[in-house]
């Protein structure tokens, strides 16, 4: 009987998954080390390492340095979240998109904003407030601060025709970010723009993106009442 060989990390990953799902390796069990698996699978140890890292990142394996690798006791399902261009999001729903700039101003930010973005309180940032509309109905209110020391080109952009959301994703790279989801109560101004009563519950996304150690932008996106977020597990 020929022993199958595994020549890429995806095939090793598939075999490890098969053994986990078949309960050959049960939750909490330690699995063989990389050297033994490489010998069994007829591949390089680096190939095994890549496969196990991928499964650890997905929450199925628990890897600890010098302690070995075991099947996770409680695998964590991780969702894939895409930072979408709001215009594309609306058009993919088959709706007509419209964008409206409400305010654009270079100004010193509130202390909470400068603290989050780690900028000097006296350093002005570009503040953008805009409305995204779907089929002539308010869809989302965007309230954004842009660090112009990192993105100086934003000072030359009027943001009359294109949203800061879309412009930044197209023109400005970032290395990592932070994101938070919450329910917030609409202020009087928010309610006026979104066409809902004051204190209406709004699904809100707060996002802060960085280019290495420098903040790029801090955005709060508030969606009209009834909005749903869908993602992929």
Image: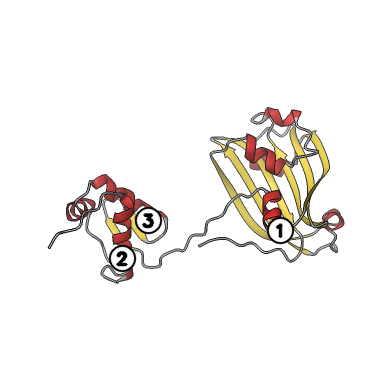
Residue 40 appears in view = yes
Name the disc covering residue 94, or none.
1
Q: Are marks 2 and 3 in contact (CB under 8 Å)?
A: no
Q: Position of residue 43 (x, y in %)?
A: 22, 49
* Residue furthest left in the image: 1
Depth check, mark 2 against mark 3: the one in front is: 2
Name which residue lies at 31% across and 65% down: 18
CA separation, marks 2 and 3? 15 Å
Q: CA distance from mark 2 to mark 1?
A: 40 Å
Instruction: Report x, y in % for residue 126.
Output: 75, 35
Residue indicated by mark 2: 18
Farthest bottom residue? Answer: 23
Q: Relative to 63, is 174 above or below?
A: above
* Callout 2 crowding tier (Cα within 10 Å): few <14, some 14–19, many ≥20: few
> Disc 2 vs disc 1: Cβ atoms closer than 8 Å?
no
Front label number (1 vs 3):
1
């Amino acid at each position: 009987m020929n022993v199958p060989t595994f020549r890429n990390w995806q095939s090793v990953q598939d075999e490890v998954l098969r053994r986990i799902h078949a309960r050959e390796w049960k939750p909490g069990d330690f699995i063989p080390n990389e050297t033994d698996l490489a010998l069994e699978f007829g591949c390089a140890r680096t190939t095994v390492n890549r496969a196990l890292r991928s499964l650890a990142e997905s929450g199925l394996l628990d890897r600890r340095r010098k302690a070995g690798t075991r099947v996770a006791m409680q695998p964590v399902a991780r969702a894939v979240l895409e930072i979408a261009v709001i215009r594309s999001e609306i058009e993919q729903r088959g709706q007509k998109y419209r964008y409206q700039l409400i305010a654009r101003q270079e100004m010193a930010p509130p202390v909470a904003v400068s603290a989050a973005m780690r900028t000097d309180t006296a350093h002005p940032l570009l503040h953008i407030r805009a409305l995204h509309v779907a089929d002539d109905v308010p869809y989302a209110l965007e309230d954004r601060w842009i660090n112009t020391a990192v993105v100086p080109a934003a000072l030359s952009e009027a943001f009359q025709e294109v949203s800061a959301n879309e412009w930044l994703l197209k023109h400005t790279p970032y290395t990592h970010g932070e994101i938070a989801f919450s329910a917030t109560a609409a202020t009087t101004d928010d309610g006026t723009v979104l066409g809902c009563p004051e204190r209406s519950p709004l699904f809100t996304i707060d996002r802060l993106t960085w280019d290495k150690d420098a903040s790029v932008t801090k955005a709060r996106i508030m969606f009209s009442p009834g909005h749903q977020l869908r993602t992929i597990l």
